[in-house]
Image: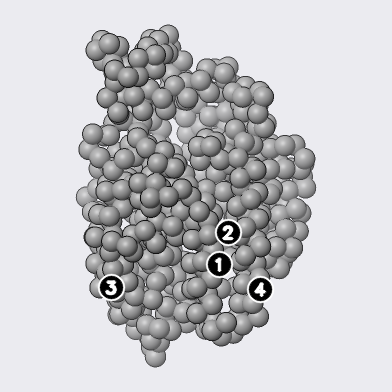
Amino acid sequence: MQETIRKFKEILAKLNAYQHALGVMQYDSETAMPRAGAAGYAAAMGALSEEVYKLQTSDAFKGAVRELLSRKAELDEITRREAEVLGEEMARMDCVPVQEFVEYQTELGLASSAWREAKQRSDYALFAPHLQKLLDSTRRFARYYAPDRDPYDVLLDEYEKGMTQAELDRFFGTLRENLMPLVQRVAERADAVDDRFLFGHFPVAQQRRLAGAVMEVMGLDRSRCALGEVEHPFTTNFSKNDVRITTHYHEESLASSLYSVIHEGGHALYELNTDDALIGSPLAGGASMGMHESQSRLYENLIGRSAGFARFLFPKVQALFPAQLAGVTAQDFYRAVNRSAPSLIRIDADELTYPFHILIRYELEKRLVAGDLPLQDLPAEWNRLYKEVLGVAVPDDAHGVLQDSHWSGGSFGYFPSYAIGSAYGAQILESMKKDLDVDALTEAGNLAPITAWLAERIYRFGKVKTPGELLRSACGADFDPQFYVDYLTRKYTALYNL
């Protein structure tokens, strides 16, 4: 058994090295690579991905995983969980012919570059052929892996273990029934909150200083956490000592990058606080996309947009932009950064309308994966749903179907994690308040006890525990979206004096 574990860990170390290299290449492609480098990048991604495939489907690796799974009772918790997680990945990988896998990885590199160009030109037709290839491959892979299951359920399961369309239909149905009337009531009082001072001219140099100050308040150690600039903000990590967040500075908007940094910082705190025993392990990341999003959105919204944190943060913001914020109070700032109004762009959406941006994507993805929505009709369907659900007209592809990068990365089934994560976060916050005076801590800008509470119950476990186990550990109960509904109802009823 010890020899089997040794071989298993040896292969894991090689896989980790390849994944590290692939991750750095992807980060570079988003932050620094010139457009003409796309073809070379895609070819390199394909070649390295082939080596990953060979390792994960090798007789030595498969034999070691099977041996470990057959004798799980003899393993320590981390090795047992590694074998379980990688056994599932191995089963998925083993179903896909190597040539198809390499072609798919190569196409990912090309699709990412095509999406950026298409968005810049606001021309969906430039991206559509790449999207078709990725969608075809994704559907085919899902059928290889689980031919007796609905392909979209298979994809959802990769991001949120156990999640199904049936459960998501109930979840989004609950949100639509309970929150859409509130969205409509708030929209009728849109003029009750003035956020015009958040738009104007905010030089990027000062925004960078603000981002650095926020990272310091959040406890993001710059020796372990870097900040880059991209078209579409994201977080990536190579170990708990190398986490990279990104943002996009908009000179005409103060809040966009500010809350992007807090959001991505929430992701980073998860990675930075995993247990040292998980360094180099496939268990080092978050338990699921939903659990990861629970932390980014908890910090961005439940903490970052709280009244107490607004009172703490506003003097720092005003000191950097004194002319733009002359005569503005901390209460004005709090109300402005929480203003709710149906809008076009998901990443800039307020808390109340945000889950309906996700609902639209969920409905489209279901139909795309099922083959019920031809890709040539996707922009028109996107625009129709935005008008039907949120009441807004989409002016062009850049502000519509091309606004997100996820599909260019093959991430079908990812979007629901954002809404699920938001609901997780509300339930976790209520549990945290039983142990900590969260309002006092946020008003003092003392976020360390909050991070420590989360690290003890969620972060340190990485993928060792499932999302359900973590929720029960942190909250003493299973997932209940009513906490999310109640949180949003309380907040926006008070904010708009309804």
Which residue position is annotated with label 4? 184
Q: Position of residue 401 (x, y in %)?
A: 66, 53
Q: Earlier in the sequence, mark 3 or mark 2?
A: 2
Disc 1 secondary structure class: loop
Q: Which residue is mark 3?
A: 440
Q: Cβ–Cβ below 8 Å for labels 1 and 2?
A: no
Above or below: residue 109 compared with residue 145: below
Badge 3 marks a residue whose secondary structure is helix
Give amino acid for label 4.
Gln
Q: Residue furthest bottom?
A: 327
Q: Which residue is mark 2?
A: 355
User: What residue is disc 1 on?
Assistant: 352
- Is 333 or 44 nearer to us in this picture? 333
Where residue 318 sits, quadrant-wise, is: bottom left
Can you tell which quarter of the image residue 385 is in? bottom right
Residue name at image x 64 percent, y 50 percent: 170
